[in-house]
Amino acid sequence: MNLDVPDSRLVTPAVLEQLREDHVRLARVMRVLEREVDFLDVDDGPNYPLLTAIVTYVRTYADAVHHPTEAKVFDRLLHKGLTPAERHVVFLNLGKHQEINEHSRKLQNNLLEAIHNGNVLTTRRLLEDIQQYLLQQRKHMAFEELHLFPLVESRLNDADWNLIDAELMPGPDPLFDSKLEHFRTLYDYIIEAER
Ligand SMILES: [Fe+2]
């Protein structure tokens, strides 16, 4: 056996590695969101620019790039002779993407409403919504890490990954990769919060 040649099955495909990294990063953003709600200063009210940056980031990267990438990968799984139970898990998860994307959109609306009407009711509604959103995002990522990613890893071969690669046009993460000026304050906030 030639030990210099790596067994490709032992090397995690770049796309899957990126998806896992996306989860780590989104979890960091969710921790900042949670902190913002937990330590809310009643007199000052929510930090709206920070909340806006978080929701904008989630909508432009997690919902618009990460979920479609996962959808392509999970879609490929459906060609790999899954059991009915496994197929159910894949479809269930794809449905969750729709729910989360819709929730992000709703959260953005609640945020805009709270910014413009800034009363106790709209602020309370926003904070309750954020609590639900945090729970939903975390449950969803944990589900994928526990059920979907291992399935992907065990079923997809090099040919599948080549097909996926050919169809993907992944954009860079605007917060952690491109470090766009637009997200600079959020990025600094995350780093500061993790100290
Ligand atoms: Fe995901």
Image (cartoon, helix red, strand yellow):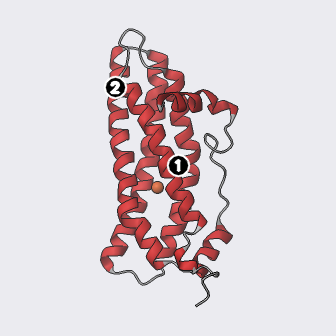
Tell me if 136 is positioned left or right of 20 in this view.
left
The residue beneath circle 1 is 63
Specify the quadrant of the image occupied by residue 179: top right
**Residue 112, how many percent across, how many down?**
49, 25
The residue beneath circle 2 is 38
**Residue 105 visible to an observer of this rendering:** no
Specify the quadrant of the image occupied by residue 34: top left
Specify the quadrant of the image occupied by residue 176: top right
**Residue 128, how many percent across, how many down?**
32, 30
Tell me the quadrant of the picture where the N terminus can be found.
bottom right
Which residue appears at 32% of the width and 79% of the height? 84
Which residue appears at 64% of the width and 82% of the height? 5
Q: Residue furthest bottom?
A: 1
Camera-side residue: 157 or 89?
A: 157
**Residue 78, how many percent across, how many down?**
45, 76
**Residue 144, how many percent across, how many down?**
40, 60
How far, Cα to Cα, is label 2 from label 1? 25 Å
Within 10 Å of disc 1 (Cα), the crowding (few <14, some 14-19, many 20+) is: many
**Residue 153 visible to an observer of this rendering:** yes
Provide the secondary structure element on which disc 1 rests: helix
Type of amino acid under label 2? Asp
Whichever of labels 2 and 1 marks the residue nearer the N terminus, that label is 2
Q: Are marks 2 and 1 in contact (CB under 8 Å)?
A: no
Q: How many marks?
A: 2
* Residue 96 in the image: above or below residue 187: below
* Residue 74 in the image: above or below residue 56: below
Instruction: Report the disc number at residue 131.
Output: none
